[in-house]
Amino acid sequence: MIQVQLIEELKNNIKEAKFSNKSIGFVPTMGYLHEGHMSLVKQARRENDYVVMSIFVNPAQFGPNEDLAKYPRDLQRDSKMAKEAGVDLLFFPQVNEMYPQDGGISIQAGTQANILCGSSRPGHFDGVLKVVTKLFHLVEPKTVYFGQKDAQQLAIIETLVKDYNFPLEVRRVETVREPDGLAKSSRNVFLSPKERSEAPMIRKAIKLGHEHFKLNQDIARAKQITIQHIEDNISGKIDYVELLSYPSLTNDLLNDTDVILAVAVFFENVRLIDNMMWNIKERY
Ligand code: AMP
């Protein structure tokens, strides 16, 4: 595995891969890798000749009161895991390499960013769009891999790619979970033992809401069942429970659309998210 920190070195390696007609699969991450990230790499490995991973804790997507400084980092361990998973090229730039003084042009997400995580994280998705736009141009991938766990991010990136004709395909990869159902996340290390034991109830609550929705298509009741299960079993505070169309993320549930039941819960030192997607026609 080749490891580079500079854009120039990245571009040289990409050029070589392109020259050899290799298809490039790209997995952008913020590091502190776990099996969720690895499943993106595995799929990229299966579908491409050349796999690029980036590790960059992107300051542009953190608000002033968020956890940028304490976001977990372990580059040595990450690099070992990436190598074992079959990454060909690991790009881990410094902040000033990615964001030297620029012309102040920003990329703004649309209405999809006004709800769910966007409500409590203003500007977050603009920061995500800033980094992925830059990375997509640098890596020139044929296919990019994102986790369904961050479904709002996925919806917004899919829209960016479609609206602005990026010459690449976005793959949605299923959420990888702990044996008890908790979605794997770099932030799970911030849970206290008590919170860790409660956290799998988020998944359980979403499943209950989903089951109920399939039975009688009652959005309000499905949300209420999800909320109730969280409130009865978790000491954390609900940020949101929403049942929306996907990928538009509106309340407009059309007959032939995917829907998402998305949840975020604040614990003492961390906010966890999870979701489930299905087609609205799915019924018992
Ligand atoms: P992050 O490092 O948190 O920015 O995540 C990098 C990529 O890994 C994103 O596309 C995430 O959606 C994806 N990801 C994070 N956790 C999981 C998980 N548990 N299962 C699948 N993909 C995940």
Image (cartoon, helix red, strand yellow):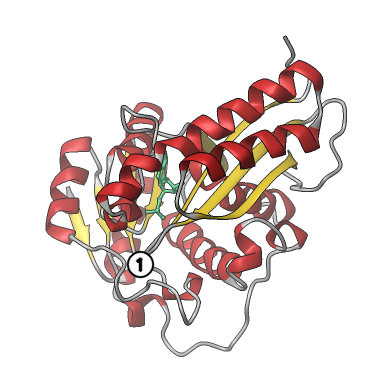
Inspect this view and state whether residue 143 appears. Answer: no
The answer to whether residue 214 is above or below residue 133 is above
Residue lying furthest front: 232
**Residue on which the image places disc 1:** 57
Q: Picture coordinates of residue 25 (x, y %)?
A: 41, 41
Left or right position of 253 against 62: right
Q: Quadrant of residue 191?
A: bottom left
Left or right position of 76 against 244: left
> Residue visible at 59% across and 64% down?
125
The answer to whether residue 193 is above or below residue 129 is above
Q: Picture coordinates of residue 136 (x, y %)?
A: 49, 57
Left or right position of 283 against 116: right
In the image, what residue type sits under mark 1? Val
> Residue visible at 65% across and 21% down?
211
> Residue visible at 56% across and 68% down?
124
Count of number-bearing discs: 1
Inspect this view and state whether residue 243 appears. Answer: yes
- Quarter the C terminus occupies: top right
> Residue visible at 57% across and 40% down?
169
Q: For this rendering, which residue is in front, 259 or 189? A: 189
Q: Picture coordinates of residue 144 (x, y %)?
A: 48, 44
Dot 1, how many residues are within 10 Å of its Cα: few (below 14), some (14-19), or many (20+)?
many
Q: Helix or strand or loop: what does disc 1 sit on?
A: loop
Residue lying furthest top: 284
Q: Quadrant of residue 279?
A: top right
